């Protein structure tokens, strides 16, 4: 069962090769930087904390030793001694004979965790990290030998936390920088990796455009050498095949011209004595004359197509006033009799560089196509495309036929393709090469041709040629 359309739209579009390579480098750099930063932070944090605790523990023992001789019945000596200790930000507290002697009245016995006091009550020195008022502290408890006194020293670790936060910020910045470097490296590497594919794509596009001699440059990379050699071999085989087919069509067309000329001359002789022939013979003669004319047109088109395939077509370019030229081309065509030519005011002065003979053949072929399959052309228009400064001009031929189905609008420009409408036509004219020749001629003029529905809503087809204008 097919997925609903809205689910299909939600699916992410697949990434291109260059994007995938860049993403792989970025993810690799990000993962590596995260692992290194995390490891560095954990190791450095543990080292700094252990060093800080060791320093504070040694200082606490020194301060405790200096207070031993102050223990007696007078607690005032203890306070005096505590005030003279090199504390460097620590808060000493002495519990002696049930009394507490703190320097800082805000940091007394209540600030000491119960667990630390319980450890000290066993007579064994202890240390413990805890939080007081949301800040990290280190508490050291040292029982005084020979008395029931305990020396506590509490140190605020906020400065150490600040240092660790600065270290974390530096590591995060380094991780981002490493990831960005990975992205840049990925973009560079992907560009180098995709460059041969881009060259192959451009070469394939050139071959598709008719430049069959296009080849890829040899490379030293052993991995890409196989691709280059295979592509060049394929292009050479394709060129040989196209040239062989073109020569075959050209040779066949040339070989057919001699008997066709004989048939045409014979038909003209018979046509001059048509009145002397019986009725059935006259009808047969008319059919013969029509088929010979059609055959001559087919052979001429095949010769023209073979010239395109062989690359032997050259344009004799000259500047043409497009509106005047189209009007003259319509009048000169057999199928253009009575067809109105409409030239927009803004396109009246447009000038194109074109081969007059070939472009006139393009207009004639479109008019013939309209006559054979669309009931005859109804109008030929010359206009400019929408936009502030159009760089091209549009020549459109409209007919009153059934139109061209959307699925056949590209097919009818191929060789010998006439679409489903060919089976409904009332004439045997046309072999399916007229629009193919239109496409080739327009392509040589750096333009394009397409078919669409008529813009006025009336049934029929509208064949449009777009050609670049000169400044």
Image (cartoon, rainbow, N blue to C red):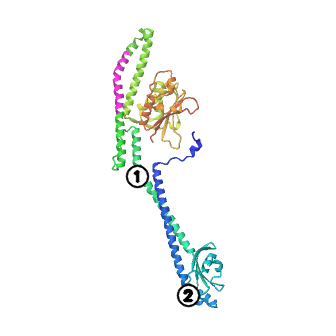
| The residue positioned farthest toward the front in the image shown | 122
Name the spot of residue 208 as percent of width and height, x first. 41, 38
Left or right: 138 with respect to 251? right
- Residue that protrudes farthest toward the bottom in the picture: 73
Taking the magenta stretch, the answer to whether it contains residue 89 is no
Q: Position of residue 26 (x, y in %)?
A: 47, 56
What label does residue 66 carry, if any?
2
Q: Quadrant of the C terminus?
A: top left
User: Does residue 434 appear in this view?
Assistant: yes
How many circles with numbers are drawn on the protein? 2
Q: Quadrant of the N terminus?
A: top right
**Mark-to-mark CA distance, 1 and 2:** 72 Å
Q: Examine the rendered structure and indicate whether residue 304 appears above or below residue 84.
A: above
266 up-or-down from 184: above or below: above
Q: Residue at the location (35% across, 20% down)?
A: 259
Q: Are marks 1 and 2 in contact (CB under 8 Å)?
A: no
- Residue 261 in magenta stretch: yes
Question: Which element carries disc 1, helix, strand or loop?
Answer: helix
Q: Which mark is residue 192?
A: 1
Question: Alpha-carbon neighbours of circle 1 within 10 Å: few (<14), some, or many (≥20)?
Answer: few
Of 412 and 164, nearer the camera is 164
- Residue 329 visible in the shown view: no
The stretch in magenta equals 243-266
Which of marks 2 and 1 precedes in the sequence? 2
User: Residue placed at 43% from the left, 38% from the top?
Assistant: 446
Closer to viewer: mark 1 or mark 2: 2
Q: Which element type, helix, strand or loop, lies under badge 2?
A: helix
Residue 403: image x %, image y %? 54, 29
């Amino acid at each position: 069962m097919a997925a609903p359309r809205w689910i299909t739209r939600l699916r992410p579009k697949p990434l291109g090769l260059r994007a995938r390579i860049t993403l792989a480098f970025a993810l690799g750099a990000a993962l590596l930087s995260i692992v290194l930063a995390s490891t560095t932070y954990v190791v450095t944090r543990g080292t700094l904390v252990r060093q800080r605790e060791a320093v504070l523990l040694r200082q606490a023992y020194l301060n405790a030793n200096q207070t031993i001789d102050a223990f007696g019945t007078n607690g005032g000596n203890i306070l005096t001694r505590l005030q003279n200790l090199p504390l460097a930000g620590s808060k000493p507290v002495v519990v002696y004979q049930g009394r507490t002697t703190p320097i800082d009245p805000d940091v007394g016995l209540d600030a000491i965790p119960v667990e630390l006091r319980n450890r000290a009550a066993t007579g064994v020195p202890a240390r413990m990290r805890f939080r007081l008022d949301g800040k990290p502290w280190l508490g050291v408890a040292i029982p005084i030998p020979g008395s029931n006194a305990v020396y506590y020293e509490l140190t605020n670790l906020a400065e150490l936390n600040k240092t660790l936060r600065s270290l974390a910020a530096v590591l995060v910045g380094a991780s981002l920088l490493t990831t960005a470097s990975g992205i840049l490296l990925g973009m560079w590497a992907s560009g180098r990796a995709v460059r041969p594919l881009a060259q192959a794509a451009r070469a394939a596009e050139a071959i598709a455009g008719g430049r069959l001699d296009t080849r890829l440059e040899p490379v030293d990379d052993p991995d890409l050498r196989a691709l280059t050699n295979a592509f060049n071999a394929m292009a050479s085989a394709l060129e040989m095949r196209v040239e062989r087919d073109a020569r075959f069509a050209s040779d066949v067309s040339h070989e057919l011209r001699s008997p066709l000329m004989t048939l045409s001359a014979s038909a003209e002789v018979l046509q001059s004595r048509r009145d002397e022939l019986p009725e059935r013979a006259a009808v047969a003669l008319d059919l013969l004359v029509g088929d010979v004319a059609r055959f001559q047109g087919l052979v001429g088109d095949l010769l023209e197509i073979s010239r395109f395939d062989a690359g032997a077509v050259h344009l004799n370019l000259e500047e043409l006033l497009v509106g005047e030229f189209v009007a003259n081309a319509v009048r000169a065509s057999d199928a253009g009799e009575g067809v109105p030519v409409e030239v927009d005011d803004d396109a009246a002065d447009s000038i194109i560089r074109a081969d007059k003979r070939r472009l006139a053949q393009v207009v004639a072929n479109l008019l013939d196509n309209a006559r054979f399959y669309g009931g005859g052309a109804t109008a030929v228009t010359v206009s400019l495309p929408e936009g502030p400064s159009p760089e091209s001009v549009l020549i459109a031929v409209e007919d009153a036929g059934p139109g061209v189905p959307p699925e056949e609008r590209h097919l009818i420009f191929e060789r010998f393709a006439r679409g489903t409408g060919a089976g409904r036509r009332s004439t045997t004219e046309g072999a399916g090469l007229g629009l193919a020749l239109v496409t080739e001629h327009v392509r040589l003029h750096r333009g394009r041709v397409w078919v669409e529905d008529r813009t006025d809503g009336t049934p029929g087809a509208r064949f449009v040629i777009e050609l670049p204008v000169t400044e």
